[in-house]
């Protein structure tokens, strides 16, 4: 990607994004709702034209060779896109026909991908009888029918139960290892992003960090202590001013970044004399990285969250 820009009327959704993803990598595109992840994926998949800049996918330019790009990629959309009244098998068959997969190869491949996502025994059932997890698995299988080189997954695990999420991550690793696929996925789940080899953090259409999860976390260093108190609003400035440490409100908690948690906690207990209700000490997570980079936490979901982000972005710019 080189200087990718996308405007919706006057609104800049993607503000000049440049980075490379090497072949065979599991790459995570991480950011809150509205950050510009789906817009970027749609540009890479040739479904949207960039306002400026360009990108090359599997060696093909998205502007000049969109057909070749489309042949090279599998795409799992953020929103469900299966035909509910077709069976699982028919959904795959339809897709394979559109991609001109040769009939003998098609049969073998369909059996293979259905097996992989554990839907072989349900292949003759209509999709409308499937659970959310089964549908998602079928969409992944469909994205693989034509042997793509690059698989794009837009929020592949949103709204799924933990077991299904875990299974989907197993497929992702399997596909990279066994089929040599390059995988580009978006997520706003920090814990999931840890499964990626490298992560680009996007916020308000800009890349704010790009590295391995380990390196991103090492930027923070030290420990994170989370406390809840009888009045977080009152206590937060006390921590910042009297103890001279970096502290932020995170939901119902105050998150404090310190070098050595075990040394800081006794000081904290003395300073806040009996005001602490609960306390957790942990090594930095990607949540903390995001907070560190943007001054906000990422877990702001739903409509209100989007509104909150807008208010925030107005304040910021
Ligand atoms: N078709 C569109 N028209 C106008 N604004 C859009 C459109 N699609 C997305 N946006 C806006 O662009 C921003 C980025 O959206 P999107 O790429 O969907 O973010 P993400 O996938 O990271 O949640 C958001 O503020 C969103 O409201
Ligand atoms: Mg999206």
Image (tube, rainbow, N blue to C red):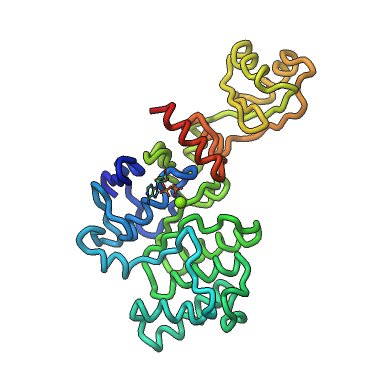
Which residue is located at x 40 percent, y 41 percent? 210
x and y percentages locating residue 264 in the rendered image: 67, 20
Of residue 24 and residue 301, the one placed in the foreground of this image is: 301
Lateral position of residue 44 relative to residue 272, left or right: left
For this orientation, the residue located farthest to the bottom is: 104
x and y percentages locating residue 46 in the rendered image: 30, 60
Q: Quadrant of residue 287?
A: top right
Q: Is residue 274 above or below residue 172?
A: above
Of residue 97 and residue 218, the one placed in the foreground of this image is: 97
Q: Quadrant of residue 239?
A: top right
Q: Is residue 211 above or below residue 237?
A: below
Of residue 301 and residue 227, the one placed in the foreground of this image is: 301
x and y percentages locating residue 53 in the rendered image: 24, 47
Which residue is located at x 48 percent, y 77 percent? 91
Residue 286 visible here: no
Q: Quadrant of residue 167?
A: bottom right
Lateral position of residue 262 relative to residue 55, left or right: right
Which residue is located at x 50 percent, y 55 percent? 155
x and y percentages locating residue 292 in the rendered image: 50, 30
Q: Is residue 264 above or below residue 110?
A: above
For this orientation, the residue located farthest to the left is: 64
Which residue is located at x 50 percent, y 29 percent? 295
């Amino acid at each position: 990607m080189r200087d990718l820009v996308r405007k919706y009327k006057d609104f800049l959704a993607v503000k000049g994004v440049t980075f490379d993803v090497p072949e065979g990598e599991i790459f995570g595109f991480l950011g809150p709702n509205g950050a510009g992840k789906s817009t970027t994926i749609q540009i890479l998949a040739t479904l949207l034209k960039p306002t400026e800049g360009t990108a090359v996918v599997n060696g093909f330019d998205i502007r000049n060779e969109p057909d070749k790009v489309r042949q090279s990629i599998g795409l799992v959309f953020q929103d469900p896109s299966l035909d509910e009244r077709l069976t699982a098998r028919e959904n795959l068959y339809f897709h394979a026909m559109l991609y001109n997969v040769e009939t003998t190869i098609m049969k073998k491949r369909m059996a293979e991908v259905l097996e992989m996502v554990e839907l072989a025994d349900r292949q003759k059932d209509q999709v409308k009888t499937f659970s959310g997890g089964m549908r998602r698995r079928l969409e992944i299988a469909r994205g693989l029918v034509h042997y793509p080189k690059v698989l794009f997954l837009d929020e592949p695990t949103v709204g799924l139960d933990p077991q299904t999420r875990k299974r989907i991550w197993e497929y992702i690793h399997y596909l990279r290892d066994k089929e040599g696929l390059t995988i580009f996925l978006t997520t706003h789940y920090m814990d999931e992003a840890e499964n990626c080899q490298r992560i680009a953090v996007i916020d308000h259409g800009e890349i704010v960090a790009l590295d391995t999860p380990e390196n991103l976390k090492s930027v923070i260093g030290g420990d994170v202590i989370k406390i809840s108190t009888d009045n977080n609003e009152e206590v937060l400035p006390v921590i910042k001013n009297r103890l001279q440490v970096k502290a932020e409100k995170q939901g119902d908690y105050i998150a404090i970044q310190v070098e050595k948690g075990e040394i800081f906690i006794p000081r904290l207990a003395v300073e806040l004399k009996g005001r602490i209700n609960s306390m957790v000490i942990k090594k930095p997570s990607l949540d903390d990285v995001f907070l560190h980079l943007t001054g906000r936490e990422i877990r702001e979901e739903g409509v209100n969250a989007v509104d909150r982000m807008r208010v925030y972005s107005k304040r910021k710019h």
